[in-house]
């Protein structure tokens, strides 16, 4: 079974690397709590590939022309009429502008209600202090763009699985993504994107063992 799983992962990765356009950049983001930030022109595609499986990727998005305008989870949930993020889901701003659209998804479920991990929340939940976190990554990634802690907003969690039961109960469970799974987004206007490859060891969001991701920017030809 292990050999079959490995072959399946290799096939998925080959498919994920078959980019239907011209590649602008291709970077592996490490498993040790690394981050990624980039300014995307309108029409640019962003492919995020889960190399090891079950790896949460926390994500922020800003209008590049006015960074006071940023992704708004509540508007996105209302206007997409659903809580699970997948193909066709539009990322709306606080002014209800479309910042990005999910154009491809090999998993079928991502999250935008679970938020980002932080040292403070880790301490409250697990009694462990001084942990590395997505909040730390966001702060480092935002600083060169003139942004700070007050600019961290409710985020998207690619590959994270937060099912909601009929009674409203919700919890972070092991992700559904396998090695080689990916999600594609298209910038509908110039945007700043910030990703944190989640370093969380204390819950299932990264399969209890954070692994690298790969981020490819590309444009249609």
Image (tube, helix red, strand yellow):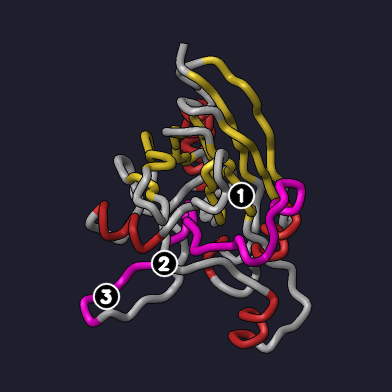
Please say if the residues under marks 2 and 1 sit with CB atoms less than 8 Å apart.
no
142 sits to left or right of 57: right
Q: Which residue is mark 1?
A: 195
| Label 2 Cα crowd, 10 Å radius (few <14 / some 14-19 / many 20+) | some
Residue 129: x and y in percent read: 75, 82
Q: Is residue 65 magenta?
A: no
Depth order, front residue of 199/89: 89
How many angstroms separate mark 2 from mark 1 (CA)? Answer: 16 Å
Q: Does residue 125 show up? A: yes
How many angstroms separate mark 2 from mark 3 (CA)? Answer: 14 Å
First to last magenta residue range: 142-167
Question: For the point 72% across and 51% down, which residue is it?
Answer: 146
Q: Which mark is residue 184?
A: none
Q: Which residue is mark 3?
A: 165
Please say if the residues under marks 2 and 3 sit with CB atoms less than 8 Å apart.
no
**Closer to the N terminus: mark 2 or mark 1?**
2
- Secondary structure of the magenta portion, mostly? loop
Q: Is residue 169 above or below residue 52?
A: below
Q: Which mark is residue 113?
A: 2
The quadrant holding residue 216 is: top right
């Amino acid at each position: 079974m292990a050999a079959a799983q490995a072959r399946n992962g290799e096939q998925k990765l080959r498919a994920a690397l078959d980019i239907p356009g011209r590649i602008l950049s291709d970077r592996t983001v490490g498993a040790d709590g690394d981050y990624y930030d980039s300014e995307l022109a309108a029409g640019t595609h962003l492919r995020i590939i889960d190399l090891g499986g079950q790896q949460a990727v926390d994500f922020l998005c800003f209008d590049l022309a006015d960074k006071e305008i940023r992704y708004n989870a509540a508007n996105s949930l209302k206007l997409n009429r659903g809580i699970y993020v997948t193909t066709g889901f539009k990322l709306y701003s606080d002014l209800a502008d479309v910042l990005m659209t999910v154009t491809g998804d090999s998993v079928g479920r991502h999250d935008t209600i679970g938020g980002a991990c932080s040292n403070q929340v880790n301490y409250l939940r697990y009694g462990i202090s001084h942990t590395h976190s997505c909040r730390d990554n966001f702060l480092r990634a935002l600083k060169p763009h003139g942004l700070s802690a007050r600019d961290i907003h409710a985020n998207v969690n690619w590959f994270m699985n937060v099912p909601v039961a009929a009674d409203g109960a919700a919890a972070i469970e092991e992700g559904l993504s396998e090695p080689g799974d990916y999600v594609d987004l298209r910038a509908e206007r110039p945007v700043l994107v910030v990703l944190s490859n989640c370093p969380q060891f204390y819950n299932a969001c990264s399969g209890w063992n954070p692994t690298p991701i790969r981020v490819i920017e590309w444009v249609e030809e």
